[in-house]
Image (spheres, rainbow, N blue to C red):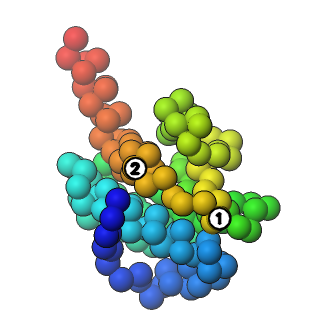
């Protein structure tokens, strides 16, 4: 996806990135840039809130409520694998798996796993991130479509 920019990492969030190995950190910081780029170019998402949830960097659509929280971390038991976590009570990971079964490895219904030894498939990941950042927006649209019938 070329050159991506993101705001500086907040002081409260920086230690979470510093706590992981350099290869995984590089992946997570690139994914962070991608999250902000997708949010910036996806209608209705608005400004993201970056905070910590469960000690991991988390990205919320607090301003608009358009999406589901995205967290970044390390895959449990796989210290060389970056993980992009999604709310396990959504259908997001099932949707990603249906669309990108050969692109990503998954952890149950909660995460996309990205080995630090391989490039991040940015185009496909950006599509997944956009789906997460608009999850509630799409759900509201679906309900209003049904109500209009």
Asked which quadrant contains residue 46, the reply is bottom left
From this view, report whether residue 21 is shown above or below residue 47.
below
Number of dots carrying numbers: 2
Residue at the spot x=58%, y=50% of the render? 112
Mark 2 secondary-structure assignment = helix
The answer to whether residue 56 shows anywhere in this view is yes
Quarter of the image for the N terminus: give it: bottom left
Residue at the spot x=58%, y=35% of the render? 101
Q: Report, in whole angstroms, how far the alpha carbon at label 1 lies from the one at label 2.
A: 18 Å
Residue at the spot x=20%, y=49% of the render? 43
Q: Nearer the viewer, residue 141 or 112?
A: 112
Q: Residues within 10 Å of mark 2 (few under 14, many from 20)?
A: few
Residue 120, horizontal then vertical, whole percent: 51, 58
Which residue in the protein does label 1 denote? Answer: 117
Q: Residues within 10 Å of mark 1 (few under 14, many from 20)?
A: few
Instruction: Judge left or right: residue 140 versus residue 51.
Output: left
Which residue in the protein does label 2 denote? Answer: 123
Quarter of the image for the C terminus: give it: top left
Residue 29, horizontal then vertical, whole percent: 48, 73
């Amino acid at each position: 996806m070329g050159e991506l920019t993101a705001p500086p990492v907040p002081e409260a969030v920086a230690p979470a990135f510093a706590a992981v190995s350099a290869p995984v950190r590089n992946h997570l910081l690139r994914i962070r840039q991608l999250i902000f780029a997708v949010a910036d170019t996806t209608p209705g998402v608005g400004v993201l809130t970056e905070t910590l949830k469960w000690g991991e960097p988390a990205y919320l659509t607090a301003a608009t409520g358009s999406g589901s929280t995205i967290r970044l971390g390390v895959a449990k038991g796989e210290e060389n694998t970056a993980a992009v976590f999604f709310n396990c009570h959504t259908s997001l990971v099932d949707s990603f798996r249906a669309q990108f079964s050969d692109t990503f490895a998954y952890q149950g219904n909660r995460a996309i796993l990205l080995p630090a030894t391989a490039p991040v498939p940015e185009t496909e990941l950006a599509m997944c991130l956009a789906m997460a950042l608009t999850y509630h927006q799409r759900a509201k649209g679906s309900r209003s479509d049904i109500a209009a019938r």
